[in-house]
Image: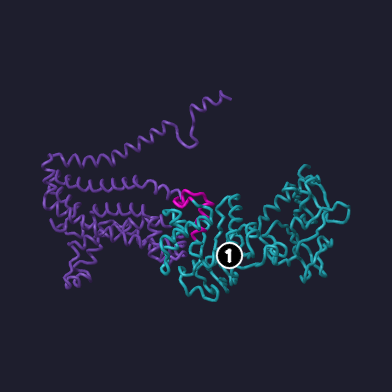
Chain colours: A cyan, B purple
C-alpha cells in the first residue's frame, strides 16, 4: 500500500505544527521521520493514521482519500511510544483485540488463538500469553504492542517513537529485530524518531523535519553525505560551524583560501559546516589554519580535539589518532579537506551556542595566560 | 570501621522522617481528632438509639412512617445514582477525552452543586417549579406534580449528587490520557466497544468510589430535599427528614434509632468498598503499577 500525504497543514493554537507538508511512502518501504521535538513529525504520523484531522491537505492510501473511511477501517497498525497496551487484558487478549473487533469476516475463536500464537512467536514472546502488561519489561511490552498492531494485517504500519522509552541496549536489539520483521512481513512502514542513529540504521529512507517542514527526504547515505540544508548537516552527526567569506566562487577564512566547492552562492558572508572527518591535522609542515587546542577527549580509537582557530576564535572539532600526543593549549595547524558551505541566511540546528562561546572565551583567556597575570 | 558502623546500625536514621517524639505527637493529634470528630459521634448515635431499651428501638424502626421514609430514601437513591452514573460518565468522558470550546465552563458547572448551599439549591427548584413560576401553571394543567412530591425530591437529589461521579472520574481519565482508546480505534473497534472494553475497565475503581459516595450522599441529603419535599409524613419524608421530625417531637431515642439505620447504611457502603478492594487488590495494584 502506497501512502501519500499531500499539502498537509495543521495548526495548534497559533503554532504551525505542519506547514504544507507532502510525503510519499512507497509500498513496502521503511521510512523514518526524523527531527527534534516540536518538528511536527508525530503530528504528521498521527494525521496519516487518522488520529488527527489536518486543517488542509489530503492523505491518500493508494489512490483512495483516507478521509472517506473511518479510522477503524483504514487498516492502520499504530504503535505508541508508551505502548498503550490494554492494562487489564492478558497479552493474548491484547493481541486478539483487533481480530475480535472485526465486524466483517470475524475469524473463529480457534483461528484467532492460532494467529495470536503465531504472532507471539514472531515477536519472540511465546509462553508469555497469560501475562498482564504490568508483568512485562518495557521491551516486551513494545513487542506485544507491535504484535497487536500486526494482528489486523495492517496495510501500513505506523510507529511513534517506538523505542523512545526503552534503555539503550534494548533499543539497539529491538531496532535490529524490527528491521528483520519488516523484511519478513514487507509492511509499508513509517516510524517517528528523534534518534538519528536509529533512523540512519533502520530506514530505507530518512525524512528530516524541522519546524513543521520537510528539510530533506533521502537515503541514509545521501542524508549524511550531501545534506540539503544546514539544518540537516548540523542535526545529523557531529558538526562545527565557522563563518567564511565567499568571493569569486571560493570560500576564505581570514583571507586564507579554503579548497572547497561553494556551488553558486553569491559573494559575501557564508557559513562553513564541518564534520570531524573534514578536518585534518597538518603534520608535514605545510600550510594550514593555525589554532589552539582547548580540550581533548577520547572517542573509541581516536582523540576528539576541540580547537579554536581564526581571528574570531571559532571552535572546530576533529579527530586525531589516539597515539599522537595532543595537549591542551597546544598550537596546531589544520587543513580543511571537506565540509559544505551554505549561505549566511540559512539556519542550522540550534545547539547551546551561548554556553559554548562563554566557556570558550574563558578558556582562551586562560590559555593565553590572561587570568594568571 | 566497625566502631563507626555499630552506632549507625543501632540508630538507623531515616533520610526523611522526624524523631520518635515528633512522630508520636503527630500520631496522637491525628488519633484524638479522629476520635473526637468521627468515632465519638458515631458511637453516640448508637448509644442514644438504645438508651430507652431495645423495645423502643424496634418500635421506632417499625413505625409506618419510618418504613415509608426508608422506602422513599431507597427509591430516591435508586433513581438518582443510576442517573448520575450515566451523566457523570458522559461528562467525564467528554471532558477528559475531547477538546472543545467551553470545556472549562462545563467543569465549573459540574462543581456548582458543591459550591452552592443545598438550601439554596432547593429554593432554586421551588422558584423553578413553584405555583408562581412560569412553569408551575403549565405543569399543574398537565397534572404533573413536582414540588412537595417524589419527583421534586428526586430532582433535588440528582442536582446535589451530580458532581460526585464526574469529579471522581475526570482526573483519573485525564491522567490516563487517550492513547489506549486511540489504539483500540486504530485496531478497528467502534465507539461502544472501545468504551466498554477499554475505557470502562480502566476507571472501574474510580467509578465504584464515585457511585458509593454518590449513593451515601443521595441517601443522606437533607437541605435541598427539606425545601422541596413539604415534609408530608408517610408521603414525602426521607430518612433524614424523618429523623429531624422525630427529634423536634422530643422523641430523641426514636430519632437516634432511625439515625442508626442511616448510619448502618453508610457503614455497609464502606464495608462493601473495603471488601471489594481486598478482593481485587491484585488487579488494582497491577493497574497502579502500570
Determine if the magenta segment contains residue A221.
no
Q: Residue at x 56, y 23 (%)?
A: B3
Question: In front: B94, or A300?
Answer: A300
Check the picture and name the quadrant holding the C terminus of chain A. Answer: top right
As displayed, is residue B105 above or below residue B67? below
User: As drawn, is A95 to the left or to the right of A178?
Assistant: left
Question: In front: A14, or B205?
Answer: B205
Chain under numbered label 1: A
Q: Which residues are magenta?
A: A127-148
**Element carrying mark 1:** loop
The spot of residue A372 in percent (x, y) is: 77, 42
Dot 1 crowding, Cα within 10 Å, few <14, some 14–19, many 20+: some
The spot of residue A145 in percent (x, y) is: 50, 57
Check the picture and name the quadrant holding the N terminus of chain A. Answer: bottom right
Secondary structure that dominates the magenta span = helix
The spot of residue B214 in percent (x, y) is: 29, 54
Q: Which residue is mark 1?
A: A186
User: As drawn, is A203 to the left or to the right of A69?
Assistant: right
As displayed, is residue B36 above or below residue B87? above
The spot of residue B81 in percent (x, y) is: 27, 57
- Can you tell which quarter of the image residue A335 is in? bottom right
Amino acid at each position: 500500500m502506497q501512502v501519500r500525504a499531500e499539502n498537509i497543514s495543521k495548526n495548534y493554537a497559533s503554532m504551525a505544527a505542519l506547514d504544507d507538508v507532502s510525503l510519499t511512502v512507497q509500498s513496502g518501504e521503511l521510512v523514518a521521520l526524523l527531527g527534534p521535538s516540536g518538528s511536527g513529525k508525530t503530528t504528521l504520523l498521527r494525521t496519516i493514521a487518522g488520529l488527527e484531522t489536518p486543517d488542509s491537505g489530503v492523505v491518500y492510501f493508494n489512490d483512495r482519500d483516507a478521509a472517506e473511511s473511518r479510522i477503524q477501517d483504514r487498516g492502520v497498525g499504530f504503535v505508541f511510544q508508551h505502548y498503550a497496551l490494554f492494562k487489564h487484558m492478558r497479552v493474548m487478549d491484547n493481541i486478539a483485540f483487533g481480530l475480535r473487533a472485526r465486524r466483517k469476516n470475524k475469524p473463529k475463536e480457534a483461528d484467532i488463538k492460532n494467529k495470536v500464537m503465531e504472532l507471539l512467536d514472531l515477536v519472540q514472546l511465546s509462553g508469555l500469553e497469560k501475562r498482564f502488561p504490568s508483568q512485562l519489561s518495557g521491551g516486551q511490552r513494545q513487542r506485544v504492542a507491535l504484535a497487536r498492531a500486526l494482528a489486523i494485517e495492517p496495510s501500513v504500519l505506523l510507529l511513534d517513537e517506538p523505542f523512545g522509552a526503552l534503555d539503550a541496549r534494548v533499543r539497539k536489539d529491538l531496532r535490529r529485530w524490527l528491521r528483520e520483521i519488516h523484511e519478513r512481513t514487507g509492511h509499508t512502514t513509517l516510524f517517528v524518531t528523534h534518534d538519528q542513529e536509529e533512523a540512519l540504521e533502520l530506514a530505507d529512507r530518512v525524512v528530516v523535519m524541522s519546524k513543521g517542514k520537510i528539510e530533506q527526504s533521502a537515503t541514509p547515505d545521501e542524508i549524511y553525505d550531501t545534506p540539503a540544508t544546514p539544518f540537516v548537516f548540523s542535526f545529523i552527526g557531529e558538526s562545527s560551524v565557522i563563518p567564511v567569506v565567499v568571493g569569486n566562487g571560493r570560500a576564505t577564512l581570514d583571507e586564507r583560501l579554503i579548497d572547497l566547492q561553494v556551488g553558486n552562492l553569491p559573494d559575501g558572508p557564508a557559513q562553513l559546516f564541518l564534520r570531524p572527518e573534514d578536518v585534518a591535522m597538518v603534520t608535514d609542515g605545510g600550510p594550514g589554519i593555525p589554532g589552539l587546542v582547548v580540550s581533548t577527549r577520547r572517542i573509541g580509537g581516536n582523540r576528539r580535539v576541540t580547537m579554536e582557530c581564526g581571528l574570531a576564535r571559532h571552535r572546530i572539532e576533529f579527530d586525531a589518532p589516539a597515539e599522537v600526543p595532543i595537549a591542551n593549549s597546544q598550537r596546531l595547524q589544520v587543513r580543511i579537506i571537506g565540509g559544505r558551505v551554505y549561505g549566511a541566511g540559512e539556519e542550522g540546528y540550534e545547539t547551546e551556542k551561548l554556553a559554548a562561546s562563554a566557556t570558550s572565551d574563558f578558556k582562551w583567556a586562560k590559555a593565553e595566560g590572561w587570568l594568571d597575570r | 570501621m566497625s566502631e563507626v558502623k555499630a552506632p549507625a546500625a543501632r540508630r538507623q536514621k531515616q533520610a526523611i522522617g522526624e524523631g520518635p517524639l515528633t512522630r508520636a505527637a503527630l500520631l496522637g493529634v491525628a488519633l484524638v481528632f479522629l476520635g473526637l470528630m468521627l468515632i465519638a459521634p458515631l458511637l453516640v448515635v448508637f448509644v442514644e438509639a438504645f438508651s430507652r431499651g431495645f423495645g423502643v428501638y424496634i418500635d421506632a424502626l417499625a413505625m409506618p412512617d419510618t418504613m415509608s421514609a426508608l422506602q422513599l430514601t431507597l427509591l430516591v437513591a435508586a433513581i438518582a445514582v443510576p442517573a448520575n452514573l450515566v451523566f457523570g460518565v458522559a461528562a467525564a468522558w467528554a471532558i477528559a477525552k475531547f477538546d472543545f470550546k467551553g470545556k472549562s465552563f462545563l467543569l465549573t458547572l459540574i462543581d456548582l452543586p458543591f459550591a452552592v448551599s443545598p438550601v439554596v439549591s432547593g429554593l432554586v427548584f421551588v422558584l423553578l417549579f413553584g405555583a408562581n413560576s412560569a412553569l408551575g401553571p403549565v405543569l399543574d394543567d398537565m397534572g404533573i406534580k413536582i414540588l412537595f412530591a417524589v419527583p421534586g425530591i428526586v430532582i433535588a437529589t440528582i442536582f446535589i449528587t451530580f458532581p460526585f461521579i464526574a469529579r471522581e472520574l475526570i482526573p483519573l481519565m485525564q491522567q490516563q490520557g487517550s492513547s489506549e482508546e486511540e489504539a483500540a480505534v486504530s485496531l478497528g473497534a467502534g465507539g461502544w466497544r472501545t468504551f466498554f472494553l477499554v475505557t470502562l475497565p480502566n476507571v472501574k475503581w474510580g467509578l465504584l468510589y464515585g457511585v458509593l459516595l454518590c449513593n451515601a450522599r443521595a441517601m443522606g441529603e437533607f437541605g435541598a430535599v427539606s425545601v422541596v419535599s413539604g415534609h408530608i409524613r408517610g408521603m414525602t419524608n426521607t430518612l433524614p427528614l424523618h429523623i429531624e421530625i422525630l427529634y423536634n417531637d422530643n422523641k430523641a431515642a426514636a430519632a437516634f434509632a432511625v439515625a442508626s439505620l442511616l448510619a448502618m447504611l453508610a457503614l455497609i457502603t464502606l464495608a462493601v468498598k473495603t471488601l471489594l478492594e481486598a478482593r481485587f487488590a491484585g488487579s488494582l495494584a497491577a493497574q497502579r503499577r502500570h
